[in-house]
Image: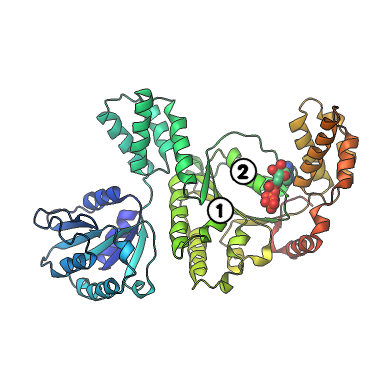
Amino acid sequence: MNFTQDLRLLLKSRYPIIVINTREEDRLEYIIKHSLNCSNSQQVYSWDFVDGYTNNPSDNGYAKRNPLLALEFIENLNNESLNLFLLKDFDSFLNEIVLIRKLRNLAKIIKTQSKHIIIISCKINIPFALNDIITVIDLPLPSLLEIKKEIIRLSKALNLNLNSELVNNITKSCQGLSIDRIRKVITKIIAQYNQIDSRSLPIIIEEKRQIINQTHLLEFYPYSKVNRDIGGLDVLKQWLQKRSRSFSKQSLNYGIPSPKGLLLVGIQGTGKSLTAKAIASDWMLPLLRLDMGKLFGGLVGESESKMREMINISEGLSPCILWIDEIDKAFSGLHSQGDSGTSARVFGTFITWLSEKKAPVFVVATANKIQSLPSEMLRKGRFDEIFFLDLPNRQERESIFKIHLSKVRPRSWQKYDIHELSLLCNKFSGAEIEQAIIESMHTAFSEEREFSTEDIKIAIKQFVPLAFTDKEQVESLQAWAGDGRARNASLT
Ligand SMILES: Nc1ncnc2c1ncn2[C@@H]1O[C@H](COP(=O)(O)OP(=O)(O)OP(=O)(O)O)[C@@H](O)[C@H]1O
């Protein structure tokens, strides 16, 4: 069901108070007035804290700076027809006892009348006493069709002649932005170039990157073709290769459901993050990195809004890859957190979204400590597959050496004795192999000469890998995976 269908159903089922989670007040008002066919028989009243009611000359300014009076207006209105009351800024007062009581009383009355209160809010923090009478839904970011209509409307208003290819490209790059932001960025482009052409695309993408990064929750990496070679992990790579076109139109027409995502569990430095970035690059999709720690930081109640915002942005940008780094850190000790159940609720929202999402958002979650992950997350149906990334075997180490040496010495990497080096660094992770190469380069550079196999051998000998310093943790992960709870990412 889409947003308007959802809303219509709630109104038809006589839900008295609905909170709509969005920052786009104007767009929501437009959608409500137009797609709900609000004719004369369906009156939409709009209230905000500063101007009071604004829609009707006879009520203009009524209940200005007085949320209680705004509710009394709803109670006293005698009107047989369907009435919707859009209340802006109202979420800031939801914790006041007088308003909680008034809303509870009013909910009973308006249930039997054709009145509905719609609270527009971008921070969901519903007091416990109102949970049973309030329903929260989200206004998704504009669809491609809505964006395209807006681009065409703007270009007509600005007297610009855009060909259809440019309209499509601009539309695609605006995906994930609100209508308001789209207007702002187009105005900025016009101010700079006096027209819209292919130079506009990087400006839009940069604007999008900044806006998403401002959430302090998500980081946006637009699609770019970067060579991200992964050494070893052949089973995982084959699995991914098979699904590389699963977000294409052809795959959809074939009837294949979009893949949900992967959980990558493994020892530090074994290529989990590298894999997330490589998927985005190979599948030619943008990448969003979610900072789970930030989700739970900040004020009480914020994490719920943030989780909804994260879902809204990633669905608005889809198809995309959502990389959730160190998911174990965010949800560890979930049931013992003394935050009156917020973490558990946010976790519930996340898990439900993961299992039921229809939008093509491919989630790549990474974790180092499987013991701290809630068991609900490991259940079938959450992720398509759980892979375990172990320390690389000898052959894998050889290909990791090859990847990193050919990166720094593209013409002469063959002169290094990769076979011997790979034998020497048993129990090294990919990151540690890379580190040993860098260390040997530093040594040789400081002595003003080229680095050699011998330098790398010395660096390896001096290096104490994590497999020794954190032996217990590494072995317990290996034992967990050995029990068949995850698929090995490497050929054994
Ligand atoms: N299999 C591999 N092939 C090539 N390079 C690798 C591999 N594994 C690790 N590396 C190198 O090590 C770097 C760090 O690895 P990465 O960040 O992907 O590890 P991780 O498993 O995500 O570690 P952490 O759990 O600490 O986040 C990579 O950017 C890459 O340069």
For marks 2 and 1, the one nearer the N-term is 2
Q: Nearer the viewer, mark 2 or mark 1?
A: 1
Mark 2 residue CB less than 8 A from any atom of ligand 1: yes
At 59% from the left and 45% from the top, the residue drawn is 243
Q: Which residue in the structure is indicated by mark 2?
A: 277
At 51% from the left and 49% from the top, the residue drawn is 218
Q: Label 1 sits on what residue type?
A: Asp
**Residue 200 seen from this side:** yes
At 81% from the left and 39% from the top, the residue drawn is 439
Q: Which residue in the structure is indicated by mark 1?
A: 291
Q: Label 2 sits on what residue type?
A: Lys
Location of residue 15 in the rendering, given as x and y in whole percent from the top left corner: 28, 68
At 79% from the left and 54% from the top, the residue drawn is 466
Location of residue 158 in the rendering, given as x and y in whole percent from the top left corner: 27, 28
**Residue 114 seen from this side:** no
Location of residue 178 in the rendering, given as x and y in whole percent from the top left corner: 37, 44
Which colour style is shown? rainbow
